Amino acid sequence: MSALLDGDLSAASKMAGVSLTEYFVTDQARWLWQFRLDQMAADPGQARWMVRQAIVGEKGLVVGHAGFHGPPDEVGMVEIGYSVVPGFRRQGYARSTLNELLRRAAEEAAVTTVRASISPANLASLATISGFGFVEVGAQWDEEDGLELVFEVPARRVSPA
């Protein structure tokens, strides 16, 4: 993430062992890398919960990134986040990525609930979570993203759509 934050796509790709795209060094992506690096600096134990690249196929095609916003909170809730490279959108990669995040959450004994916070204007992401059992539980204001609808699903009652 440090290499990505520095805009060094070549070094980041080498460290990751896959070819990352320019999508990983956009201003929005760099904001995320800084945020996650700050989280890990404050608590290195959070690293395993952080963002990873979303890879498909034997050739390791990187189609986006996904992860959790951090470890489970005191009641066992984890929040997910995912993003697909624009050229790979509308091909099922977001649903596959979501399915993998839900599978990982279900395998963790400490996780009871999975949360997704989505802008009401993000119709693609709203469509992505449909069919996975998410229920709208409220709304919140995010300093970075503005108004978000909050959805949750029990971690172990998830069945792929």
Image: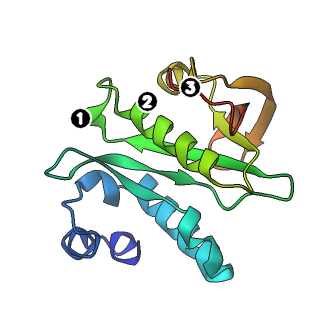
SS for tag 1?
Answer: helix
Which residue: 57% across, 26% down?
159
Q: What residue type is labelled 3?
A: Ile
Q: How many labels does the image show?
A: 3
Q: Classify residue 57 by image quadrant.
A: top left
Q: Distance between the Cα atoms at labels 1 and 3?
A: 20 Å
State the image coordinates of residue 80 (x, y, percent, origin top left): 60, 45
Callout 2: 10 Å neighbours few (<14), some, many (20+)?
A: many
Task: Give the mark, 3 or 2, whose residue is nearer the N terminus.
Answer: 2
Tell me: residue 103, above or below residue 52.
above
Q: Name the residue under label 1.
A: 87
User: Which residue in the protein does label 2 denote?
Assistant: 95
Residue 85: quarter of image: top left
Q: Can you tell which of label 1 and label 3 is closer to the viewer?
A: 3
Residue found at x 54% / y 74%: 37
Compare residues 67 and 118 and report the one nearer the observer: 67
Q: Earlier in the sequence, mark 1 or mark 3?
A: 1
Q: Whole-percent x and y of residue 129? A: 56, 25
Residue at the disc numbered 3: 129
What is the CA distance from the residue labelled 1 to the residue labelled 2?
16 Å
1 and 2 marks in contact (CB < 8 Å) = no
Q: In this view, does 103 lie above or below 20?
A: above
Are the two marked residues, 3 and 2, in contact with CB atoms closer than 8 angstroms? no
Badge 2 amino acid = Arg
Relative horizontal placement of residue 136, taking residue 17 as reference (left or right): right
Q: Is mark 2 on a helix, strand or loop?
A: helix
Q: Earlier in the sequence, mark 1 or mark 2?
A: 1
